[in-house]
Image (tube, rainbow, N blue to C red):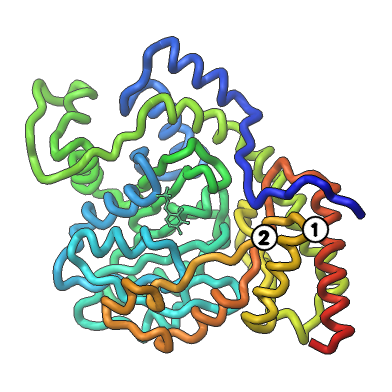
Amino acid sequence: MIQVEKIAFNRPYLRGKEKEYLLNAFEQESLQGDGYYTKKVSDFLQKNFAFSHVLMTTSGSHALELAVQTAGLGPGDEVIMPSFTFTSTANAVLNQGATPVFAELKSDTLNLDPTDLLAKITKRTKAVIPVHYGGIVCEMKKINAIAHEHNLIVIEDAAHALNSSYYGKAAGSLGDFGCFSFHASKNFCCGEGGALVINSQQPELWEKAEIIREKGTNRSQFLRGEIYKYSWISSGSSYLPADILMALLLGQLENKTRITYLREKIHKFYFTNLQEFLTGDLLQGMSFIPEGRSSNYHIFFLRVKNKRLRDYILQQLKEAGISATFHFQPLHASKMGAKLGYKAADLPLSNEAAQTLIRLPIYPDLTKSAQTYIISKLRDIFLNLQRAGA
Ligand SMILES: *Cc1c(COP(=O)(O)O)cnc(C)c1O
């Protein structure tokens, strides 16, 4: 089979009303934060996912920062999170002077291992940040039970997981806080953007987050006509996304069912076809949907036997014009991880998963012929390896 064009790893899918809403925001000169489209988007999220309170932010990183600040975490506090995550999960904690504590993952889903969470709890532990890897929600029943027992705040890093669920409840609605990203690489995007969901029913927390997000002022209350003038209340920052980006995002979100359906088809196609020739001796696992979960199909991954094999397969795919890729370097094993006192050997399962991981292209515009081509290339690579007794 001949595939001339290179197959991209990821592409946004802008086929809904994104352009119409963008132009409208432009024509209405609705540019600044908390305008017409920001309100539309937060209402949409609230309604569709039964979130109690939503604040749109400039990024997923900023949603995490806002959550950590609103939770009141600071110096002396430890926050447990998986090592296998994006730097933003840990930066949000570090930026407030609190200490990230890295825990192991489960080798099948690559999500936080509740057993290791429990093992890492000390007198100083104040919070946990489970990361819903690839759109599969963590074992939240166990994590929430541990958190409840030890009085920990739960901040979901749901950057991958909008439109995923866990026993019927939306990702981001399961902890005290949920953080989403609308970065261009995520399923629903506006270039750069995010959202903080506050599930706590304490209005003081909503207000606190609102004030931090509005440069430490109660301007949000003022704009709602609740107070007569606004003033400086606390420290804070500016986490308001431009309304013009929220216009784009509304188009994306309104198209969520179609976007998810198209991703699901690719996920299923990979899953079914790979079963045919991927056998236990070369393969350690691949993306699957555990019991009680629904996925937004953010990632499709494979895990092969070892790093050497993984690097070889990635190279072969690259030569065939297919942009497959690895993912996070475990944070504990990074330069910054060393500064925090970790040694690479501290979390062997996280290292192993990171070193053996391959992510395949998955996005609505990935054509059937491209999918078939990817499968056929992988089949060739694996059959050759098996023949060679690798
Ligand atoms: C993308 C991502 C973030 C941060 O999102 P940005 O919008 O890029 O700031 C945080 N955590 C995880 C796990 C992510 O993948």
Q: Residue at x 62, y 56 (%)?
A: 295
Residue with the mark numbered 2:
324
Outermost residue, front side? 319
The alpha-carbon separation of the residues under discs 1 and 2 comes to: 10 Å
Q: At numbered mark 1, what does the secondary structure look like: helix, strand or loop? A: helix
Residue 102 appears in the rendering: yes
The residue type indicated by label 1 comes to Ile
Q: In which quadrant of the rendered image does the C terminus lie?
A: bottom right
Residue 141 appears in the rendering: no
Residue 374 is labelled as 1
Q: Position of residue 383 (x, y in %)?
A: 87, 76
Name the foreground residue: 2 vs 280.
2
The quadrant in which residue 374 appears is: bottom right
Give the mark, 1 or 2, whose residue is nearer the N terminus: 2
The residue type indicated by label 2 comes to Ala
Q: Residue at x 53, y 63 (%)?
A: 133
- 112 relative to 369 in the view: left or right: left
Q: Position of residue 110 (x, y in %)?
A: 55, 72
